[in-house]
Image (tube, helix red, strand yellow):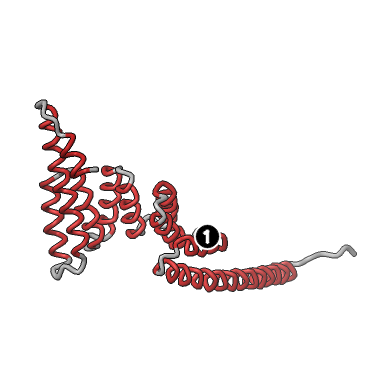
């Protein structure tokens, strides 16, 4: 008599298969969870170490820590962001922008990365690009004072007096005690220089020799 599998036997086989699949899934999930916890612990230590070195002005050493964190987890947007900050401190602005872009691709809502990208772009004289980055940071958090400080500084370089005044008022609203006066002083200075440069261009167009003034104020 040929061996036949009845409906009950089929049901038991399917049940066993499901149980085995669940056990395999749970074992795999547990391993992955343990791996993530270990990775987080390792990268968290590297982040803290990197921050401490950065505060001491040891930017190359800090950079090495964030590089290690990225090797452990290539999608660690904080490590990419911090790496960008260290490169910015080392005046490697294009490389810094590349790191900020990586951080933003991983986490588009990272207002800090947007703001620091603006700073690097500003250092390269890419003021409109920098302004767009500030606006992105403000879209994410309109009460983020450092984005407004940065924006005021950039508008100062661009010589946009009207928007500069609006930004300046917003900064005073967000920071009434003037906890970061240096940022405002830099923004004011940028605006003053922008006005003088425009005046020098006007005088040059009128045929005046302004070479001495350029050497004195802008060399």
Callout 1 secondary element: helix
Q: Which residue is most to the right?
A: 1
Side of 8 where 22 appears, left or right: left
User: In the rendered image of this protein, does residue 94 appear above or below residue 11?
Assistant: above
Side of 81 where 186 appears, left or right: left
Q: Position of residue 98 (x, y in %)?
A: 43, 49
Is the N terminus in the top left, top right, bottom left or bottom right quadrant? bottom right
Q: Position of residue 108 (x, y in %)?
A: 38, 55
Task: Indicate the quadrant where residue 104 lies.
Answer: bottom left
Q: Nearer the viewer, residue 19 or 138?
A: 138
Q: Nearer the viewer, residue 17 or 152?
A: 152
- Residue 101 in view (yes/no): no
Q: Are there few (<14), some (14-19), or many (20+) residues within 10 Å of tag 1?
A: some
- The residue under the point 64% across, 71% down is 22
- Residue 3 in view (yes/no): yes
Q: Position of residue 44 (x, y in %)?
A: 49, 71
Side of 126 where 187 appears, left or right: left
- The residue under the point 19% across, 69% down is 179
Check disc 1 and report the residue beneath it: 67
- The residue under the point 17% across, 58% down is 185
């Amino acid at each position: 008599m040929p061996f036949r599998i009845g409906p009950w036997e089929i049901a038991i086989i399917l049940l066993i298969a499901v149980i085995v699949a669940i056990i395999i899934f749970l074992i795999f999930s547990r391993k992955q969870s343990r791996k993530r916890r270990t990775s987080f612990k390792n990268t968290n230590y590297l982040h803290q170490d990197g921050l401490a070195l950065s505060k001491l002005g040891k930017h190359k050493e800090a950079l090495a820590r964030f590089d290690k964190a990225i090797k452990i987890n290539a999608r660690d947007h904080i490590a990419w962001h911090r790496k960008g900050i260290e490169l910015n401190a080392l005046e490697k602005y294009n490389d810094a922008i590349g790191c900020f872009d990586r951080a933003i691709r991983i986490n588009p809502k990272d207002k800090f990365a947007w703001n620091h990208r603006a700073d690097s772009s500003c250092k390269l004289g890419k003021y409109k690009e920098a302004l767009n980055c500030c606006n992105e940071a403000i879209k994410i958090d309109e009460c983020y004072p450092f984005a407004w400080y940065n924006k005021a500084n950039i508008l100062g370089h661009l010589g946009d007096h009207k928007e500069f005044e609006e930004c300046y008022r917003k900064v005073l609203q967000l920071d009434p005690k003037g906890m970061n006066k240096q940022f405002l002083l830099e923004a004011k200075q940028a605006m003053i220089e922008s006005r003088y440069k425009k005046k020098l261009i006007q005088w040059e167009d009128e045929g005046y020799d302004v070479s001495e003034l350029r050497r004195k104020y802008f060399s």
